[in-house]
Amino acid sequence: AQKVTQAQTEISVVEKEDVTLDCVYETRDTTYYLFWYKQPPSGELVFLIRRNSFDEQNEISGRYSWNFQKSTSSFNFTITASQVVDSAVYFCALHYPGAGSYQLTFGKGTKLSVIP
Amino acid sequence: DTGVSQNPRHKITKRGQNVTFRCDPISEHNRLYWYRQTLGQGPEFLTYFQNEAQLEKSRLLSDRFSAERPKGSFSTLEIQRTEQGDSAMYLCASSSLAQPTAKNIQYFGAGTRLSVL
């Protein structure tokens, strides 16, 4: 069975602070993909990053960085120098090709509030 | 590219009525997905199409739900005899087989919010 756990339900930070959103996943498969999506109040899920299970390199994109650690089954997301526009719900998701399935399994999300 | 488009954005209906939602995927995306999202939860998979073929259905997709993608372009999701428990955001996503670097990345629309009174 696949499962994604985002233990932090809500986080509030003051603008310019760094913040890390945690994601822990469970899968028996050796080949899988991990994703992060952002859902602003408008409702549309915005794709941020995809990482495959064979690539444990950390990635940085502007103020965003991701730390993938297979040993702890974690794929954490850090926002550096947070801004008010970062306020949204962030979802971690898992896809394993497995038996030809293409569905994403999402965590419950972490609501991030950045206070000016 | 225009993004995934969903209509209507909001739908209010009375219990027992039928409702239909439409999703227009990103042009030339051959895969299309439907998800349901309730308050405070992540999206849950409902069903998936590759071109016009419906290849995967979740147990969440009860007999009252039906989805179609007749010409492999837009898709509709119909809920018959709506119940209050059907109140949720219905999200559509699409992805491309043809672009190796973007393969399996699902791009989402803004959703249709259904309220069943």
Image: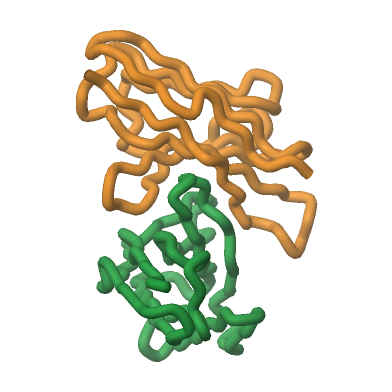
Furthest-top residue in this view? B17
Which chain is drawn using orange? B
Residue drawn at x 38%, y 72% as measured from the top left? A115
Q: Give the vertical position of A115 relative to A54 (above or below).
A: above
- How many labels sit on residues? 0
Residue drawn at x 57%, y 79% as measured from the top left? A64
Q: Position of residue A78 (x, y in %)?
A: 48, 82
Furthest-front residue in this view? A116
Task: Using the rendered view, name the quadrant where residue B61 is placed.
Answer: top left
**Which quadrant of the rendered structure holds the N terminus of chain A?**
bottom left
Q: Position of residue B49 (x, y in %)?
A: 58, 35
**Which quadrant of the rendered structure holds the C terminus of chain A?**
bottom left
Q: Position of residue B26 (x, y in %)?
A: 71, 39
Q: Position of residue B103 (x, y in %)?
A: 69, 57
Examine the rendering and report whether any part of residue B104 can be seen.
yes
The answer to which of B63 and B16 lies nearer the viewer is B16
Task: Using the rendered view, name the quadrant where residue A59 is placed.
Answer: bottom right
Please indicate whether residue A69 sits to the left or right of residue B114 in the image. right
Residue drawn at x 36%, y 67% as measured from the top left? A113
Residue drawn at x 78%, y 44% as measured from the top left? B1
Examine the rendering and report whether any part of residue B57 can be seen.
no
The answer to which of B56 and B1 lies nearer the viewer is B1
Q: Give the vertical position of A53 relative to A111 (above or below).
A: below
The answer to which of A78 and B37 lies nearer the viewer is A78
Which chain is drawn using green? A
